[in-house]
Image (spheres, helix red, strand yellow):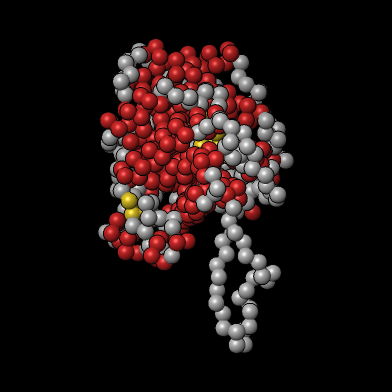
Amino acid sequence: MKLLTINKIGIPVMLACSVAFTSCEKDFGNINEPWDNRVYSAKIPEMYNGIASGMPENGRGVFSSFLYQNTQLAANYAAAGFRLDNLVGGIWNNYYFALADYRKTLELIEEQENPASYTNVRAMLTTLIAYKTLRNTTLFGDIPFAEAGMAFKGGQHYRPVYDGQETIFTTALADLKWAADNFSTSSGQVELGAYETLLQGDISKWIKFTNSLRLRYALVMREKNAAAADAIIAEVLTKPLLAPDEYLGVEPIKLSMEINRGPAFRGNSYVRMGSTIWEAMSSSNAVNGSGIFDLRTRIFFEPNSDGEWKPYPQNPPTGTVAETDNGASGGINDPYREARLTTWTPAGEYHYSPLNLYYVNDRTFPDLFITGSEVSFLKAEIYNRGIAGVAASAATAKQYYDEGITASVKYWYKLANGSAVWTVNKPAAEPTPGELSTMLSNPAVAYSATPADALKQIYQQHWISLFHQPFDAWTLKRRTGNATPNVPLAPTSEALNLNRLVYPTGEITANYDNWLNVTGGTDDRTKKSWFMP
């Protein structure tokens, strides 16, 4: 394959746009000119890597303050000290900066002497933007799309109209199909070399990535457009998909970078292990942990400061013992404080089991786009339900169900074992066959002979496997009509009936008329997104 030669490589590269200003020469002279009088021009490799560098997940304050409560993957013992509309701006801006860069890069490709030689680059970019588009619309609902990301063309594009979610799904899924059909291993395709920081130019991985996303989002929309979804599912099941032990995302170790999740759990987040996930991972409330049957429990969570396993009630009844104040005595009661990385034993007191200190503070754990484990659960669901022309098969559904659990457990053992900061209670490189067999045969896990009960199990295990992907767990919960494990939340819960994120305050200012048209003046987070049953 033809290799694009790059003279200077900067990774990651963030796009810098130059804007020309005209200044009055009197008194001020050339004060507004760049100090070195240079004009920078956008180039395809840098533009691609600018988009790639923006792929790490934004909005961690959203999931630690709101989504953990709503999905019930964890619990919050107190109301967060954050407003939802103040937390979503990073997610929104990240998408629209990337969308603008994408549209500009497509223009640059068309200007090349041989645009066809950039087909793989175009397909990579199309995959990334389609993924970000589907992610953003599942979070917010209707969003500016067809007319968005074109402000660089002039003022007439500054205030794009909002597109309906169904239209966005249709367009983005069609874009993913185009990408999957057009990736090529033939000679003559331009390679980006070291600028391709995500999958290192591995076309087979790109094809699996694209097809696996198509499978996920076809199921997301199936309850509202079964015909279109089933056509995609039927086709994709014949295409290359992620194997159980494969996963795709931003890997800090490979990029010599860090992803610091710690701040999202400290301060005003108040996160603890909740009773809903505890009941999905333990057969009893024994504080010594003797009821734990899920091998991931000790990776995701840890005992309280007294060494006891105690979940915080998802809907705390009257008389529930209050958690201690994280900020007391200089934060000594905070289980997530980094000082515990060197002195594991808590100096302070906290009554309820927190998330594992190492899970929270390891900066090398990847941000995941999609995993082979998730693909296995999607297949298990399809064969359990008998949809998309696939005959229902309990045996095949069980095969993929067991496969998904096994892959998820092995993934987390491997990740935790490879953590440089993990010292106390570090898991082995992988569970033993006996440990896996015991978990899979536990009555709460063993695949049920009753299809309806088995489907609940599929959703439960899929939900647990998404612990590190709260946005995707939230989408699973909503697209299945709350079929993931849950209990009624308190009427005062900040996460009650959270069906979509609100638009950021900056959007109201910058695009008011179109915002008003789509919201009616009330940005209602209880309004169901189009894909929800």
Q: Residue at x 30, y 20 (%)?
A: 389
Question: Which quadrant holds the C terminus?
Answer: top left
Q: Nearer the viewer, residue 184 or 8?
A: 184
Q: Is residue 246 visible?
A: yes
Q: Is residue 29 above or below residue 276?
A: below
402 w.r.t. 138: above or below: above
- Residue at position x 40%, y 62% from top? 157
Q: Residue furthest bottom?
A: 26
| Image quadrant assignment for residue 528 | top left
* Coordinates of residue 293 in the picture (x, y in percent): 51, 21
Query: Can you say which quadrant of the picture contains the N terminus?
Result: top right
Q: Nearer the viewer, residue 21 or 110?
A: 110
Residue 486 lies, in percent from the top left, at 37, 34
Res 423 → quadrant: top right
Q: Residue at x 50, y 33 (%)?
A: 183
Question: Horizontal placement of 18 versus 456: left or right?
Answer: right
Tag count: 0
Question: Residue at 44% of width from left, 28% of height from top?
Answer: 462
Q: Nearer the viewer, residue 191 or 172?
A: 191
Could you tell whether 192 is left or right of 181 in the image? right
Residue 463, visible in the rendered structure: no
Q: Identify the image quadrant of residue 341.
A: top right
Q: Residue furthest front?
A: 113
> In front here: 457 or 385?
385
Compared across the picture, whether 50 is left or right of 284 comes to: right
Horizontal and vertical percent for residue 383? 36, 19
**Picture coordinates of residue 320 (x, y %)?**
44, 41
Q: In the image as oriented, which residue stretches furthest toward the right?
A: 342
